[in-house]
Each structure stands twice: as structure tokens, then as C-alpha cells.
Image: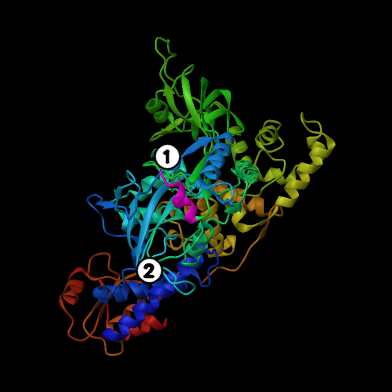
Amino acid sequence: MDREEAKRRIEQLSAEVERHNVLYHLRDAPEISDEAYDTLFRELKALETDYPDLMRSDSPTQRVGGAVLEGFETVRHTAPMLSLDSAAGEDAIVRFDERVRKTLGEDVEVAYVLEPKFDGASLELVYEDGILTVAATRGDGIEGEGITANARAIAAVPLSLDASRRPIPSLLSVRAEVIMEVGPFEEHNARLMAEGRTPFSNPRNAAAGALRQLDSALTAKRPLTIFVYDVLVAEGLRLATHWEVLAALEEWGFRVTDMRRRVTDVEAIVAKFREFEADRDEIPFEIDGMVVKLDSLADREALGMTSHHPRWAFAMKFPPRREVTRLLDIVASVGRTGVVTPVAMLRPVELSGVTVSRATLHNREEVVRKDVRKGDKVRVQRAGDVIPQVVERIPERGRRRSPPFEMPERCPSCGTELVERGPFTLCPNGLDCPAQLAGRLIHLGSRNALDIEGLGEETAKLLVSEGLVRRLPDLFDVRAEQLTPLEGFAEKSAEALVRGIAKAAHTPLHRFLFGLGIPEVGATVAKQLARHFGRLVTLREAEEEELVAVLGVGPIMAEAIAGFFREPHNVELLDALLDGRVNLEEGEPAKPAGGPFDGRKFVLTGALAGFTRDEAKAEIEGRGGRVVSSVTGKTDYVVVGDSPGSKYAKALDIGVAILDEAAFSDLLST
Ligand code: IVH
């Protein structure tokens, strides 16, 4: 391939790969398999390695990160990034509306755009001639930190804009909020905790932390997304309203909330605010209020701004999800994985409409770090679906404190001696421990698993304590007449539960996989596993090397998954579940599992007669192999052509398998 061809191909591939990024991450409508995507991506990457100067500044290969910075540069914003005037509750909006109408005069028709107030980190994105050139954090509103490489690592950030529906201003600077959705946030935290690291206290901190990684490859691994909600600078853009601006942003390819509304009176504002508040827990990300923005851009000019906030916008905040209460006790609770967690028993307190009486303290080190003891005054918080947490202790002068909490030596559920693993305390008794069995039942019945109606925490514990469920599979053998004598059950509720179980027994594979409670496997990974393998039998037999080929599965997770399916108790458990109890809906594997060269490393040296360098490379990478530049003990094959270089000698020296062109061709055709 000559330089001109390479240039054309790089342009073609950059556009194509980015199109698939958008389809996958923004539209949730992939058109090609992960494998086909990887092949395109690898071809682009290989061409960029061969012709580094032809790499485009909006190349999707930059999304995976790479360069590690020493620190961030200070970037001056294209326009001040102001804050918002705000108040909790509904009253202040009436005064805001009155002030707006008074300033504009009675004959002016007022319209507002209502948007969720995203609880994330604010970001400026600057596009020059449609290409992302700078991204910066808000900082003090005038200057922020340049985090361009990190912004590129976020799939929802367009690297270049779509000019097909509307011309793009030569300079366009927009404002967005970077957020982490609650589901991915919880999975991310679960991973951190499994590694014994301190979890983030809320998705906003997790998003802000990810944005300020010096190594953009780390940002790329975080499940971040953005919503764009404002234009800071748009040279030559002539639009009259914010409503039109949002539509334009969408046409250029930005993610804009579809929860926006346009209203003309204060009653409608209040109604929408109540709706957001009621739906707050159903929204997949955290919002902490609603933003009310004057729609007419000309009228905004008339209202002006203070140094802190514009006078044409107002944030209505939800009541806090943080409150102060008393810590009544700390008890050790055994979860489904056997981890013994210190749980804070609280004087009940209402956090945005939900009464909270318990909160997790994660592990014994966390109790020490936060220095909380029975009787202390504490601040607690709730974030989305996240389990309530104790944020901090509030010191009280002159109050005598209880002695520090100590972990019990024996399992509070089954009496087995507890063992310590890093920061964690474990009950080693597995499913013979009633608390672990009940925990596994609750998980199996939970929303993202089999979603068994009527199987809540209380019922699961009852089924275990009454001996109706001694092994997980027993759940599917429970009969209504066994339930009716139990406390809290009547004929109807007993029948309803049995029906719920029977219905849930017919389930898509990914729900079942999640429900099994395989260590490390959250709902997202469960879906990827189901997609990749299609059938449970194939997954059960998969080796670690095969598992790491699944999107989102790394070596630690692969080991945990393979280990789970090898463990004799689990083998027995699965066999019993599948023996007429659970009926799986399975599919075809998304692709033949892995390429024949998966994970193999090749080194090319010398000229081949039948292939150019690029062609040989494409052949190898198309089969899942990798071409690396130097021969080491980890190299699998050295392909030797005419007049090979020193790599040939090195290969002979350390005894790496050597392929001449004929052997290489043979290998390709096997
Ligand atoms: S507009 C000058 N719209 O809330 C007006 N801000 O507490 C610029 N925020 O710093 C802000 N969602 O980071 C706007 N739909 C939304 C928002 C939003 C969240 C953030 C923003 C701002 C903070 C103010």
C-alpha cells in the first residue's frame, strides 16, 4: 500500500470505526460484531503505526488513551463557565419567574426550557472546524485543567462533529456534564471493594476522579458518559432560542437529554419538578434537581448576569440525600459471598422520601478509618440505588464515646470461625451458612437476575430458617401448601410466590448468570458473557484465555469465572438447577469464540514474496494475533522472509518457533 492509499484508507477507517462507536455507545444499536469492530480498529491502528504523520487528530484510536501526563495544563475557558443560582424546594421559583417577567415587561411572552440537573462534573469541549481540540474541567470558571486526552477516552464525546444536517461554526465551545450511571458506578465500586480498595462515595466523585486521571487509559476504562446542555461560544451561529440550540447540538452529534421540556408558566415548572423528583430513582443516573432556563436568547441578554450566575436560569434542588442521625449500633452481617460487613444500625432518618435505618460500613478498616462507634452522631447519605452509607462522624464535645467496634471471631449466622483476607473478614462455610444461602437466594430473585416477584429479603430468610430451602435448587421445589403455615403467608400470597418462582424459572441466560452470583460478574458482564458464548455449556467449559476475549472481562475476572465453574459445589449446584428446575433461553454465540491466533504474538522479519508487511500483519491480526516489534521469550512465532535482520538471530538464540514463508502460509490456511 502506498502513502496515498494509506491516507485514504486511514480516513475511511477513522470515519467507519467512529460511526460504529456512536452506534454502539450512543444509539445502543450496533451494526457489526465486536470481532468485526476489532478488526477494523486494528487495521486503523496498524496503519497509524506505519504512517504516524497521517494519523488524524479525530482518530478513534485515541479514545483508548495512552500518553501519561506529568500534570494538567491550565486552560482558559473560551467564555466564563458560570454557576447557577439555586434553592431547595418549590417556593423560590415563583420569585424567579416574577423577577424575569418584571424585567422583561408584561407584554413579553416568556418560555422556559426545563432540564434535569445532572449531578456530575462540568466540562468544556472546544471544537475548531468541527474537530475536538481542547477539553477542560470547570476549575474556577475562568480557567480549568486541560484534560483533552481524557475527554477523548469517553465514548460519548464526539471527536469530530456531523456537518451533514447543519453547518458547524468554525469555533464551537460547549458545556457538558460528565456522569457515571448508577449501575456501572455500583459495578465499578464492587470491583474496587473486591480488590480491597476504598469505594467512591457517589457517582459524581467517581466521574470527577476519572476525569482527572493522568493516564488517559484509566479514564477509558471507566464507564463515563456526557450530556451537553449549553453553548459557550458559537461563532456565527444564528439561533433565537435555547430549544433550537439543543436541537442543533443534537444534530451535530452531541448527546442531549431527551428529558427536556419547554413550558410557559410556573405551574408547569412545578409540575415537571415533581415529576423529576418522583422519577428520580428510575433515572439511570443521578440528578440533584431541575434547571429552569429562559428560552429566548435575546431576552437572556436583557436579564444579564452576576459574576457568579446568569439571571436567566435557576436550579431547583431536590431535598438532600444526606442527613445527620445517631448510630445506634454496629452489627456484623454476613452477605451472600461470605464477607462479613459491619452494618451501621441508625436511628431512622428520611433521605429524600426513603426511611433509612441501616447503612453499610464496608469492612473493618473502613470502621477504623471513619472512626465511628456505637452512639456517635453521623452523617449518612443515599445516592440513587446505592445502599445508604455513613459519610462521616460528627464530633461532639464532651461526650463520652463507646469503645471501638470489634469484628466477632465466629460467624454470627453459623458459628464457624471467621478468617481474614486482606481488609475483609470471611465466613468460610459457603452455602452451608444460612446467612450466605439466604443472601444467594435474595440475589437470585433480584431485579436484574430472575426477578422473582414476592421473594424479598424477609421471605428468603424465612425459607432458609424454616428449612424449606437447604440448597439453592430447593427454591424451585417449594409448594404452596408448605408456605401457608408460615408466618406472613396466606393462601393467596403462598400461591403468588410459587407462581412467581415458576415464571422466573424460564429465563434468558444472562439473567441466570447474573443470579448465580459469580464473583466479579455484574449484570453488564453477564450480558456480554451470554452474548459471546450463547450457551451455558460452552461458557462452563471456557478456559481463561477464551474468557478474556469477552468485552469487559479482564484476567482477574476471567480467573474468577473459570474458578467458579470448576468448583465442585458449583458444578453440583448448576447440575441440580438445570435438572428440570430452570429452563434457559439460550442463543447462538455472537461469533466463533476467539480467532485461531487469539493472543499469539508474531514478529516479522525480512521480505516475504507473497505478502507485503501490512498484508501479513492484517492476516495475523484478522485471526486475533498480534504483531510485535521485538523478539522476547513471550514471542510465539518469528516469521522469516528474505534477508532477515537481527531478529532472526535472536529467535534462534532464545529458541522461538521460526516460520518460513511456506510454513506461515500453511498456518494461515489451517
Ligand atoms: S446550565 C450558566 N444545565 O450544575 C448556566 N448546568 O450548580 C450554566 N449542571 O456548574 C449551567 N445540569 O455543572 C446547566 N442541565 C444543566 C445542568 C447544569 C447540571 C451543573 C453545572 C453547573 C452546576 C451548577
Res 644 seen here: yes
Identify which residue is drawn at 74% across, 51% down. Answer: 503
**Which of the numbered marks, if any, corresponds to residue 482?**
none
Inspect the image, locate mark 2, and give the three-letter code of the amino acid beneath it. Gly
- In this view of the protein, which residue sits in the foreground, 75 or 582? 75
Determine whether 249 is above or below 524 in the image: below
Q: Which residues are magenta?
A: 297-305
- Neighbour class for label 2 at 10 Å: few (<14), some, many (≥20)? many
Identify which residue is drawn at 59% across, 38% down. Answer: 439
Secondary element at tag 2: loop
Secondary element at tag 1: loop
Res 519 seen here: no
Residue on which disc 1 sits: 199
Q: Nearer the viewer, mark 2 or mark 1?
A: 2
Q: Position of residue 470 (x, y in %)?
A: 66, 38
Identify which residue is drawn at 59% across, 50% down. Answer: 107
Residue on which disc 2 sits: 130
Q: Position of residue 383 (x, y in %)?
A: 52, 38
Instruction: List the single residue furthest toward the right.
Output: 491
